[in-house]
Amino acid sequence: MNSAPLVSIICTVYNQEDYVNEALDAVLEIEYPNLELIIVDNGSTDYSGRQIKNWLEEHGGKLQVIFISRSPGMPYCKSFNMAFEQAKGDYFIDLSGDDLICKEHVQKSVAHLEKNPFAAVCFSDAFLFSKGKQLRTFYKRKVSGELQSAVSDGDIYELLVAKHHCLSVTMVIRSSAFKFEGAYDESLAYEDFDIQVRLARKYPFVFSDHIGIKKRIHSKAMSVDQYKRYKSVMLPSTLKVCQKIKTMNRTQKEDLALLNRVQFELKHALLSANFQVAGGFVELAQELGAEGLGFRLYKKWLKHHWDVSAIYSFLEQLRRN
């Protein structure tokens, strides 16, 4: 009988025909004895579904697999929650069909979580790569491979509120904590910021110093549209999460951390000419006590709807390329 905790890998695929075989092949290479794989084709309109079926015919007998095909697709958070209901793992990984999981990721992450039974999440480092070329690691490292500075873990709620401290694709999550906190918020367009702060409010996070995921950067990734010109789908969800955080905060320092995040999102909402949601960020910033020349400039920018989004979008495209 296998004594290692069961880990569920839930791989969601949407129009990732160029990448899904490589992502699934990487799952087969994982050095961990007790896995189940749940593959969700969430309404793909390309050949992703056919690629998955061909892969299952060749490799499906090598591990426990459930395949869910949705037609049409549904919002990501709802789709994931429904798939999670079928997962039996003590821990789970939310894997995108264009990312690659590293061989030792599960083993090392589970070991940390088993040593820290009150922790809800183990997170690690990742390689960010594009078109087969490694760009950088998420955390800065020396030429020798060592971290340039220690990565904070434990109670990191305030850090997560203030900035992008933890790369969600590397997270291995304790299933019981995820269930207890109500899983993903299905009213949101994306999941990671919200689930991170909700879990971190109540549970420690542990960091494992290893490369867990090779994250692919490409033009069709959902994150590319985070600050989409005029009609970001993600920014209204970010505002909603920030409003939720305000109700969860307990200290003035946490409110200052939230204000830091809100003004960052406000700036990008204005740069991308998402003026309606920018108004919501201005209201929240005022509730948090925002002041100073910079904030007065943001309010004037919003009032006059100065549109610099064409320049902003061009510069963002250059940066990604």
Image: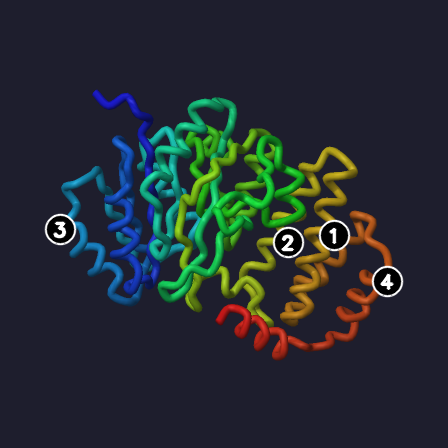
Earlier-in-chain disc, 1 versus 3? 3
Disc 3 residue crowd, few under 14, some 14–19, many 20+, Cα 10 Å: few
In the rendered image, which residue does mark 2 sit on? 239
Q: What residue type is labelled 2?
A: Leu
Q: Which amino acid does label 1 sit on?
A: Leu
**Which quadrant of the view contains residue 316?**
bottom right
Earlier-in-chain disc, 3 versus 4? 3
**Could you tell me how far apart the alpha carbons at marks 2 and 4 are, in whole angstroms?**
23 Å
Pair 1/4: label in front: 4
Q: Where is residue 203 in the image (x, y as percent from the top left)?
A: 56, 29
In the rendered image, which residue does mark 3 sit on? 58
Q: Seen in the image, is 287 located left or right of residue 238?
A: right
Q: Do the residues labelled 1 and 2 touch (CB within 8 Å)?
A: yes
Disc 4 residue crowd, few under 14, some 14–19, many 20+, Cα 10 Å: few
**Could you tell me how far apart the alpha carbons at marks 3 and 4 are, in whole angstroms?**
62 Å
| Residue 284 numbered mark, or none | 1
Earlier-in-chain disc, 2 versus 3? 3
Q: Seen in the image, is 26 located left or right of residue 186?
A: left
- Element type where label 2 sits in the image: helix
**Could you tell me how far apart the alpha carbons at marks 1 and 4 are, in whole angstroms?**
17 Å
Disc 1 residue crowd, few under 14, some 14–19, many 20+, Cα 10 Å: many
**Could you tell me how far apart the alpha carbons at marks 2 and 3 are, in whole angstroms?**
44 Å
Earlier-in-chain disc, 1 versus 4? 1
Q: Residue at x 85, y 55 (%)?
A: 291
Pair 2/3: label in front: 3
Q: Relative to 21, say whether 317 is above or below.
A: below
Q: Do the residues labelled 2 and 3 touch (CB within 8 Å)?
A: no
